[in-house]
Image (cartoon, helix red, strand yellow):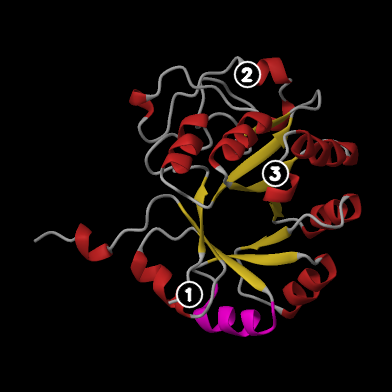
Amino acid sequence: MHKPKYVAHRGLSMHAPENTIASFELAGRSGFWGIECDTYCTTDGHWIVHHDRTVDRMTDGTGKAKDFTFDEIRSLNIVAGIGIEAHPGLRIPTLGEVLDVCKRYGMHAFIEIEEYHHDADLENLVQLVERHGMLENCSFICFNADDLKKMRAINRQVPLGYLSAEPPSDADLDLVQQLMPAFLDYCYRSTKPKDVRILTAMGIDVSVWTVNFWDDAAPFIETGVTYITTDTILMDKTALKSP
């Protein structure tokens, strides 16, 4: 059977607090091919790793992630997430720190661009990844096609992934062909295995997210999906049923 590459979503986030050094290190120790992380640029130009538009759910602070200075956001404590009790003292990590974990474990980094302030921030993002020696072992992913086009103008070689929660469309196909090297990154609930088969036959790599059960992954594996993003090591649904 075809073997996809497995990407730990926000690190191994079903086992440690999401988007923390703890979750990324756990993914590395568990042998994942890659990780996915979410990035924001602070008001003073530092790229940090966090998912939500606000810091409210995961930290003891409140406010929009992009509206903090670096020192302000680093002063917050992470107080939520799976297994938080076992990981005291966690802070929102910098992208550089996450990249260093990836480099140490030989993991690819799917870097999702969330929010920033100026186009120059994107140039600085590419330079940051290059300084950490990860530009040849990363992909930038985003729901915003315009941001991906800006990234392609900055660098012609780095892979780009277009994220979508909608079914595949002709517009997606046009976009990925403009962005090459690039791939399509779909919510597995909004796409079908037959779509993956068609796209892979056209030479387009496809990623699906966020898949936590073998039962859901198997049809996509059979049709040649390239990447599977998951919160955990894939489980069998039948194992969760009561006897």
Asked whether the beta carbons under mark 2 and mark 3 sit within 8 Å of each other, the answer is no
Question: What count of labels does the image hold?
Answer: 3
Location of the C terminus (image quadrant): bottom left
* Residue 193 seen in this snapshot: yes
Q: Secondary structure under badge 2?
A: helix
Name the amino acid type tagged 1. Answer: His
Q: Quadrant of residue 206?
A: bottom right
Other residues around mark 1 within 10 Å, as few (<14) / some (14–19) / many (≥20): few
Please tell me how crowded label 2 is: few (under 14), some (14-19), or many (20+) other residues with Cα within 10 Å: some
Residue at the spot 72% in from the left edge and 34% down from the top edge: 132
Q: Position of residue 205 (x, y in %)?
A: 65, 71
Q: Which residue is mark 1?
A: 2
Q: Is residue 218 above or below residue 97?
A: below
Mark found first going from the N terminus, 2 or 3: 2
Image-based side of 14 in relation to 98, left or right: left
Disc 3 designates what residue? 114
Give the mark nearest the N terminus, 1 or 2: 1
Q: Identify the main secondary structure in magenta.
A: helix
Q: Which label sits on residue 110?
A: none
Residue 118 picture quarter: top right
Q: Residue at x 62, y 18 (%)?
A: 74
- Disc with the residue nearer the chain's start (3 vs 1): 1
User: Is the residue under label 1 in contact with that under label 3 (CB below 8 Å)?
Assistant: no
Quarter of the figure that contains the N terminus: bottom left
Residue 220 covered by magenta stretch: no
Q: Which residue is mark 2?
A: 74
Residue 195 in magenta stretch: yes
- The answer to the question of whether label 1 and label 2 lie on touching residues, with beta carbons closer than 8 A, is no
Task: Say whether residue 138 is visible.
Answer: no
Q: For the magenta stretch, what is the residue range? A: 191-203
Amino acid type indicated by mark 3: Glu
- Mark 3 or 1, closer to the camera: 1
